[in-house]
């Protein structure tokens, strides 16, 4: 089987080497970029990049700009690396469509675990599963969502969250349970991450956003009205 291509973008050579060494040990093919402009050149030149690890603070073009540009063309999973720990930076990343967010310094083993979890969820999709709830249709094989027959563009994480909600229709889901199942057990972020994704998801679903009910003090429940 061909190796999975991962693009690592960071202006620090030492950081790129650290991440690359750990990924290569797991048999991943690693492409490197030292700034945002080079990252975009590599991304659009190679059509088979499966995941991007992206630093925020870089010369010429920062990580936010790179993410915004890539998201206008692709929903490839993106892990954002940054030295910033402020909540607003993390929320900005998720608003732009970042799938995971890791603050420096970080454990390379945790980073690899996040990479593997994202790739596992993006590839382990059975043949032709289609879920239909009212005017909502989720095609897990095609990774596509339709509302009233029209496609809705969702990030990888938004798709996973919606699928989890629908597959647990009518069940009250705590934020902790959602984190464990959608963000995987090794996610150490704030539960408010879920609220940010739900807000974006409701907006994208339009009239069907009301299917995602808030259970105050607990979490959410997906149910047709």
Image: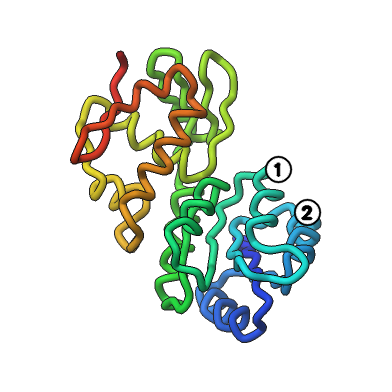
Residue furthest to the bottom in view is 14
Q: In the rendered structure, which disc, 1 or 2, sits on the residue that comes first in sequence?
A: 2
Q: On the picture, is 5 further left or further right than 107?
A: right
Q: How is the image coloured?
A: rainbow
Which residue bears the numbered disc 1? 73
Q: Dividing the picture into quarters, in which one does residue 49 lie?
A: bottom right
Q: Position of residue 48 (x, y in %)?
A: 69, 54
Q: Secondary structure at mark 1?
A: loop
Q: Are marks 1 and 2 in contact (CB under 8 Å)?
A: yes
Vertical arrangement, residue 186 with respect to residue 14, above or below: above
* Residue at the (73%, 71%) spot, across then down: 59
Residue beneath disc 2: 44
Residue 198 position, x and y percent, is: 40, 37
Q: Quadrant of residue 117?
A: bottom left
Eyeballing the image, is 145 above or below 19? above
Q: Residue at x 51, y 73 (%)?
A: 83
Residue 171 on image: x %, y %: 21, 30
Label 1 neighbour load within 10 Å: few <14, some 14-19, many 20+: few
Q: Residues within 10 Å of mark 2 (few under 14, many from 20)?
A: few
Residue in the picture at 76% in, 58% down? 40
Up-down relation of residue 159 to residue 57 (above or below): above
Residue 194 point in image, percent of width and height: 36, 45
């Amino acid at each position: 089987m061909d190796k999975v291509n991962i693009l690592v973008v960071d202006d620090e050579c030492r950081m790129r080497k650290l991440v690359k060494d750990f990924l290569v040990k797991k048999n991943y093919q690693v492409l490197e970029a030292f700034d945002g402009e080079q990252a975009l050149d590599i991304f659009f030149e190679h059509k088979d990049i499966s995941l991007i690890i992206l630093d925020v603070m870089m010369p010429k073009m920062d990580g936010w700009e790179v993410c915004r540009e890539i998201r206008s063309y692709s929903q490839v999973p993106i892990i954002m690396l940054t030295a910033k720990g402020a909540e607003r930076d993390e929320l900005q990343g998720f608003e732009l469509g970042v799938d995971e967010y890791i603050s420096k310094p970080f454990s390379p083993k945790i980073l690899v675990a996040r990479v593997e979890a994202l790739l596992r969820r993006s590839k382990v999709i059975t043949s032709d599963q289609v879920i239909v709830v009212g005017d909502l249709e989720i095609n897990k094989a095609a990774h596509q969502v339709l509302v009233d027959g029209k496609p809705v563009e969702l990030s990888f994480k938004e798709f996973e969250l919606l699928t989890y909600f629908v597959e647990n229709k009518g069940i009250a889901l705590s934020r902790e349970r959602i984190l464990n199942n959608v963000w995987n057990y090794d996610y150490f972020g704030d539960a408010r991450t879920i609220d940010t994704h739900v807000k974006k998801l409701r907006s994208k679903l339009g009239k069907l956003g009301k299917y995602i009910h808030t259970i105050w003090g607990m979490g959410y429940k997906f149910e047709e009205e």
